[in-house]
Amino acid sequence: MVYIHDPNNYCLNMPNPKDPYLIENYWSRRINPTFVDAEGHVQAFCVGELTPGGLPFPPGAVKSLHIRKNQSFNGKAYHQITGTIDCAIMNMTCSGDDGGQYDSVPYRNW
C-alpha cells in the first residue's frame, strides 16, 4: 500500500520486520534484503496519520521527501513521491538500487 496525502502524511511499503520469509532468508543470516527481495513481504510504514495496520517510520529513516501532485498522465491526476531513506535504519540493502518502487508495473489510477 502506498498512501500519499501530503508531505506530512503518507505511508509506503517497506520490508516487514516480522515476516518469516525475510527473517529466515535474510536477517537470520545477517543479510539485509533489497526492495526487490522484499516484494510480497512488506509492511506499511507511515509518517503522520497511520492507516490501519501501519507502523510509524523509525526516527531518521526518511532523509528527504518530495511530492508532486495533480500532474497529468493520460488526462488523470496522480501523486508521485521521491526521496531518500536511511537503509541501515530500515535494515535494507539499497546499494545497486536506482529507486522506483513498483515502477515495473503499469500505471493505475484507482
Image: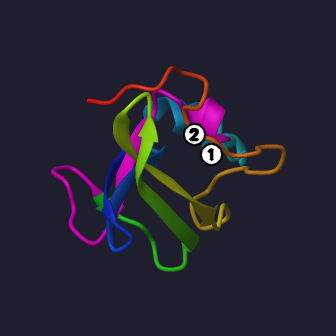
- Residue 18 in sight here: no
To which quarter of the image does residue 22 belong?
Answer: top right
Question: Residue 50's spot in the image, x, y percent?
Answer: 21, 62
The N terminus is located in which quarter? Answer: top left
Residue nearest the viewer, comparing 63 with 7: 7
Whether residue 24 appears in this view of the structure is: yes
Question: Is residue 53 shown in magenta?
Answer: yes
Q: CA distance from mark 1 to mark 2?
A: 21 Å
Is residue 64 covered in magenta?
no
Residue closest to the far top? 106
Q: Amino acid at mark 1?
A: Trp
Q: Which residues are magenta?
A: 34-54
The residue at 72%/50% (across/down) is 93
Count of marks overlaid on the render: 2
Mark 1 vs 2: CB contact within 8 A: no
Q: Would residue 47 be found to the left or right of residue 42 on screen?
A: left
Classify 10 Å Cα crowding around label 2: few (below 14), some (14-19), many (20 and above). some
Could you tell me which residue is drawn at 61 percent across and 24 percent down? 104
Mark 2 residue element: loop
Q: Image point 26% across, 54% down: which residue?
A: 54
Residue 59: image x %, image y %? 47, 79
- The single residue placed furthest to the bottom in the displayed view is 59
- Which residue is under mark 2? 101
Quadrant where the image shows the C terminus: top left
* Closer to viewer: mark 1 or mark 2: 2
Q: Which label belongs to residue 27?
A: 1
